[in-house]
Image (cartoon, rainbow, N blue to C red):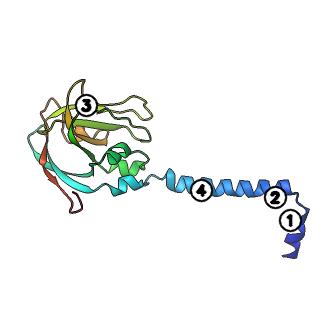
Amino acid sequence: MIAIKARLSKISLKWKIFIVLVLAGVISFGWYTSTVRSEDRVTRSFSNMPLGAIRVINDDGEEGILWVKVATTAEDRRAGFSGVGENVVRETALLYVFPRNTVERHGVRGVRLPLEMAFFQEDGTLVSISRTTVGATTTYGAPARVNYRYMLVVPQGYFERHRISVEGEAKLLPDTLLRAPSWP
């Protein structure tokens, strides 16, 4: 211990500050890579979104249940998948529920995987599907002047695997959305 103190007393204050800053940087980088960039990261906004289930009819007329995180508030809809780890995005469908018909457009800032966004009218009719690009600064929405009430956001390839397309007349059944007890 005395030997360490003797060696430390010979190091200039400038070098001591440098060593402390390097150690702080290494610790910060470790925290960043293990939490912020984690493949399984979940943001507070995302974790606060309720889990739900809704029925969907695919192009073959088959009805299935889709488990979704439900974004019902403006804050939830703004947050979406932003900052969420890739593994979580790959395994999650996110249903945006708007209080009234809208023509709103959506960005994908902070999302690290390409997504598909399906836009459904109030009666559940699928009007369009948009495919996003990672890092894009463009916004996505239904065709110009087409109102929609629900938006289903999933990882790219989901709709093809589940045979959901505009041409096939796939449909969302909004009245089947199961609501968790904590929902208003």
Mark closest to the chain's N terminus, 4 or 2: 2
Residue at screen point 73% across, 54% down: 21
Residue 128: percent from the left, percent from the top?
22, 30
- Judge by depth and name the residue closer to the eye, 104 or 41: 104
Residue at screen point 34% across, 35% down: 106
Mark closest to the chain's N terminus, 3 or 4: 4
Graded by Cα atoms within 10 Å as few (under 14), some (14 to 19) or many (20 or more), the crowding at tag 2 reads: few
Q: What residue is disc 2 on?
A: 16
Q: Helix, strand or loop at disc 2?
A: helix
> Of all residues shown, which one is farthest toward the bottom?
1
Q: Quadrant of the C terminus?
A: bottom left
Cβ–Cβ under 8 Å for marks 4 and 1: no
Mark closest to the chain's N terminus, 1 or 3: 1
Q: Amino acid at mark 2?
A: Lys
Q: What residue is disc 3 on?
A: 103
Graded by Cα atoms within 10 Å as few (under 14), some (14 to 19) or many (20 or more), the crowding at tag 1 reads: few
Q: Quadrant of the N terminus?
A: bottom right
Q: Helix, strand or loop at disc 4?
A: helix
